[in-house]
Image (cartoon, rainbow, N blue to C red):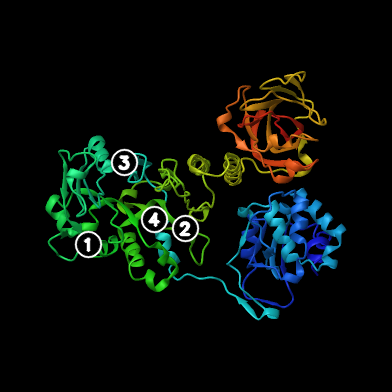
Amino acid sequence: MCSFWFVDFWDYVKAYQKLIRIDEDCIVYSSLDAVFDALNDKAVLYRKWEIDQEGCCHGLIDFCNSHFGLTDHSGLPSRPSGPYTNFFALNLETLRCEKRLFVFIENVKQSKYIFQYRWGDLALWGEVLRFLFDASQHKIFYGFSYFHGSRDSNFEIETNPNLDKIKIMQPKPSPYALIRVGGNRDGAYLLPDDLLGIKAVFSPGVNNRKDFEDELLDAYSIASHMCDYSSHPEKFRTSLKLGQTFKKKWLDINGSEDSISLKDWVQELTPDASDDLILQMDIEGAEYRNLLQTPDEILRRFRIIVIELHNIKVCNRPDDFNQELGPLLERLDQYFLCVHAHPNNCSSDFRVIGSEMNLSNVHELTFLRRDRWEGVADVDCYAPMLPHPLDIEPNDPNKPPIFLNEHWLASGKRAPESTIKLLTDQVRFLERALKQAQSPAQDIITNLYRLSQHAASALPTLTPRPTAETLVDLAAGKPFTLSSQHTACPKKGQVAEQRPFFFHTGEGFNQSITIDLGAEATLFELHIANRTKFCQERARCLFYCLHKEPKQNLHQGFPVVIDEAFLTKVDQISVTDLRGARARYVTIFSPEKTLLHLSSVQILGVPNND
C-alpha cells in the first residue's frame, strides 16, 4: 500500500485534478465538498501531522538529504514526520507542476527501499513537503471529521461557540480612507479620515508620550484630555499645549480619589452631548471593566475608538472569553464597526480554534461609529488591508513582526500593497538582526533571501494560467545585455543554452543580465540553470524584475526560487512563477557582490497579439 500511495497511484488519476484518500477502516462523518474547496489554493491537506514509527524510516532522512543536496544537517530530526495519510487530500494539478517531485519518486522507486526498509508513505510525503513545498502550500484541515478504526481514534471538526463574536474584530470596508496619526512608532494609530467636526480626544494611559494627541491638536485642532496616575506633565517628552489637559488619575470605576470614570471625565470636560469625540485607550487590561460600565449615551459620543485589547488568548477558552472580551466586543458592535486591526508583536500569535484565523495576545483595533456609513455605497468604501501600508513597523523592534493572515479578509487574498508591506517589515527586522547578530553575515543573508521567497509566494496571480501546451520559450535567441564585462566574455549576445555558462559578468554589486523579448508578452515561468562545474554558490541570491522599458528598477525585484540542490548539483532547474505579468524586458540580478553566470535561461509565456 505504501508503494501504491507514493509511486503507483499516479497512473490511475491522470484524468483527475484533485484526489482524497480515505482508507477502508475510516468512517466519514462530514461532507467532502469542503475538502475539495480547501484544495483550491493548497497542494496537500491532512488531518494530523505525526512522527513516523521507528521501524518504517531506516535511512530515509539521509537518502532525502543526499537526493535534494542538503549539506547542512544541523537541527534535523532523528526520525522523519509527515501527514497522517489515512485521510489525505491532494491537488494533483499543483503537484504535477513540480517536476522535481517525480524525479524523487523515480529515485525512491529504483532504490526499492520501500520494500527493503518498509519506508512508509507518511514519511515519504513528509519529506516531499519539507523539501519541495513551502509551508503555505499545505496545512492541517480542521473542517473534516471521521473515525479511524485501526487506531480507534475520532477526528472531530473543531468548533468555537464564540467565533461570530471574535469576528467582530474583523476589519470591514471603511467609508473613509485610513490615515496614520502619531508618528511612525509604537503609540501611532490608523484612523479613518473622518476627523472634521470632532471636538476632543480622550486618552487614558499616556506613558509620558503624546505624539498622537499633539498631531490631532496641531493638524486638526482637536483638543486632547489625558489621564495616567503613573505619569506627570514634567515627565512628558513634549510639554502640555493650549488645548490639552492632564489628570494624574487612573481611569477606573472604583470611585477612589486617585481614579475617575470615563463617564465623569467626559461629562466634566465636554458637557455638550452633541459633540463628537475620539477615544484612544491603552490601559493594560483595565479597558474591559471601564467600557463595560460606561453608559450608552457616553459610548455613543465617540465617533472613533482606538483601543488596545489585552489577553486575547481567551478566544480559545470559551468560559473566560465570555467574562470580559466577549461582552465588550458585543457592546462595541452595537454602535461601531471595526475598520482596522494591527497585531502587537510583544507576544507570539496563535490560531483561533475552529478557524484558520490567527491573533496576537495584544491587539490594536480601530472602530468607527455605524452612522458614518449612512449614504455611502458599498462600492465607495475602502477595502481593509492587512497589513495596511501605513501600519507602523512592529511595536517591539527586537521581536519578529506578526501579521494577521488572509483568513481575516473577506476576499481571502492580500492586496499587493499589503504583501509588499509584509515583506518590507520582515526584511527590516532581519536587517536589524544582522547588525546585532553574532552569527556569520551569510546566515543572515540566507535568511533574508528565504524570507523574501516566502513572502513573494503569496503574491496574487495577475493573469489566469493557460495550459502548458500554449506556453513557449520567449527568450531563446533573444538579445541580452550585461551590467559589466568579464575578460573576453562579450557584454552583449543572444540567449542560448551553453555549458559551463552562456554569459559572464564582472564582479560587483547588482550584476545583471537583461533580456529583450522583442515585444511585450504575458509571462508565466522563469526557468534558470546554474553554471556547471564550479562557482555555483555565486547564484545563491538571485532576483528578477520585469519591465516594459529598457531601463530597469532593481528596487522592484522579486526573488528567484533557489534551493540547495540548485547550488550543489548539475542540471537542476530553478522554476519561478511570474504570475502572468506583462513585460518586454526581464532582468536577473544579484544584490550581493559577486559575478553572475548561468548556463541557460528560459522565459515561458504567451506572446501578446494586441
Could you say which disc has been placed on residue 363 in the image?
A: 4
Residue 236 lies in what quarter of the image?
Answer: top left
Could you say which disc has been placed on residue 182 in the image?
A: 3
Residue 179 lies in what quarter of the image?
Answer: top left
Give the CA distance from mark 1 to mark 3. Answer: 26 Å
Residue drawn 61% across the image and 22% down it: 551
In the rendered image, the residue lying farthest to the front is 438
Kindly identify the amino acid type of the residue bearing the numbered disc 3.
Answer: Gly
| Mark 2 or mark 4: whose residue is earlier in sequence | 2
Circles 4 and 3, Cβ within 8 Å, touching? The answer is no
Quadrant for the N terminus in the image: bottom right
| Mark 1 or mark 3: whose residue is earlier in sequence | 3
Q: Nearer the viewer, mark 2 or mark 1?
A: 2
Query: Closest to the observer: 317 or 442?
Result: 442
Give the CA distance from mark 2 to mark 1. Answer: 30 Å
Residue 481 in percent (x, y) is at: 70, 21
Q: Evaluate whether residue 354 shows in this view.
A: yes
> Going by the image, does 549 lie left or right of 575?
left
**Circle 2 sits on which residue?**
349
**Circle 1 sits on which residue?**
294
Give the CA distance from mark 2 to mark 4. Answer: 10 Å
Residue drawn 85% across the image and 67% down it: 115
| Helix, strand or loop under label 1 | loop
Q: Nearer the viewer, mark 4 or mark 1?
A: 4
| Mark 2 or mark 1: whose residue is earlier in sequence | 1
Say if 501 sits above or below 147 in the image: above
Give the CA distance from mark 2 to mark 3. Answer: 25 Å
Residue 36 lies in what quarter of the image?
Answer: bottom right
Give the CA distance from mark 4 to mark 3. Answer: 18 Å
